[in-house]
Image (spheres, helix red, strand yellow):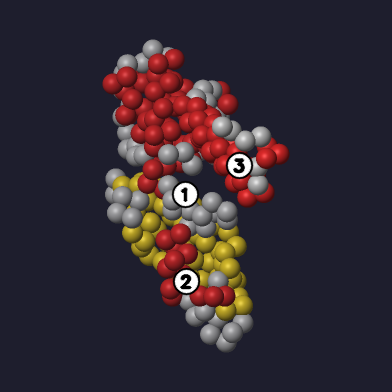
Amino acid sequence: MAKKWEELTDKEKKSGITGIIFLVLISFFIASNSCKKEEKKKEKPIVLESLSVESIKWATSDERLKIVAKYLQQENIPNEQLDVFDTYFSHMAAITPGDRGALSILTMAKSKYLREGKLEGNYWKLTDLMYGKFHGWDGSFIPLETYLKNNINDASSYEHVETRFEVRTLGKKPWLVVATKFRANNGYGAKVLAVATAKYDLLEGKLYEVQIAD
């Protein structure tokens, strides 16, 4: 026979309250996880007109591929052209100012495809090759920054100022030509401003011809 609340001992009351709280927390946890799973299932629709080139520069290859696939479907372009359009899109996004609309690149690709019947040229998936090579917070080029810290007098004094780069085709291969302005202590302990330049083979992932000038 069940006891009435007032008949329960303090220990039994505390045990009952703890059990109720535990059940409530478990129910909340299950409901919360269920909601998160539902949110993951619902992917945001791709609105081509709202995408900037900057967003493509930092997109993963899968994210970019979905964008290209949607464009081809929208423009009734055969899906067999997906890889060549994606390569062109990746290449041009890497060398186009970030504030431009990404749709403009796909429109150029379509015009070239319709005019020539194919997309040919020295194009690479540059955004993939460059992905993860730059620090997101200050734009510094990681391979060159690593080299500098390993070769200057005092690595702890290194301060990145700015980095500029351009993509060039050299010997039928894509290269980055990079210039980094930085501050660091010289051999006398005085902090000086210097500029480091280098070439970076995107296909090999190697740094060449590093030069440092005050």
Q: Does dot 3 land on a helix, a strand or a loop?
A: helix
Q: Is residue 148 or residue 1 the one in the foreground?
A: 1
Q: Is residue 208 above or below residue 173?
A: below
Residue 23 quadrant: top right
Give the amino acid type for the residue marked by disc 2 in the picture. Lys
Taking the image as drawn, is residue 29 in sight? Answer: no
Q: Does dot 2 land on a helix, a strand or a loop?
A: helix
Q: Nearer the viewer, mark 3 or mark 1?
A: 3
Which residue matches tag 3?
A: 16
Residue at the extreme top of the image, as rendered: 76
Q: Is residue 128 above or below residue 47?
A: below
The numbered mark at residue 31 is: none
Taking the image as drawn, is residue 136 in sight? Answer: yes
| Badge count | 3
Q: Is residue 88 or residue 68 the one in the foreground?
A: 68
Residue at 51%, 55% in the rendered image: 135
Which residue matches tag 1?
A: 166
Tell me which label, 2 or 1, sits earlier in the chain.
2
Query: In the image, is 23 to the left or to the right of 7?
Result: left
Residue at 43%, 32% in the rendered image: 64
Mark 2 vs 1: CB contact within 8 A: no
Give the CA separation, mark 2 to mark 3.
Answer: 62 Å
Percent x, y of residue 79: 32, 19
The numbered mark at residue 149 is: 2
Q: Is residue 18 or residue 131 the one in the foreground?
A: 18
Tell me which label, 3 or 1, sits earlier in the chain.
3
Residue at 66%, 34% in the rendered image: 4
Query: In the image, is 108 to the left or to the right of 181?
Result: left
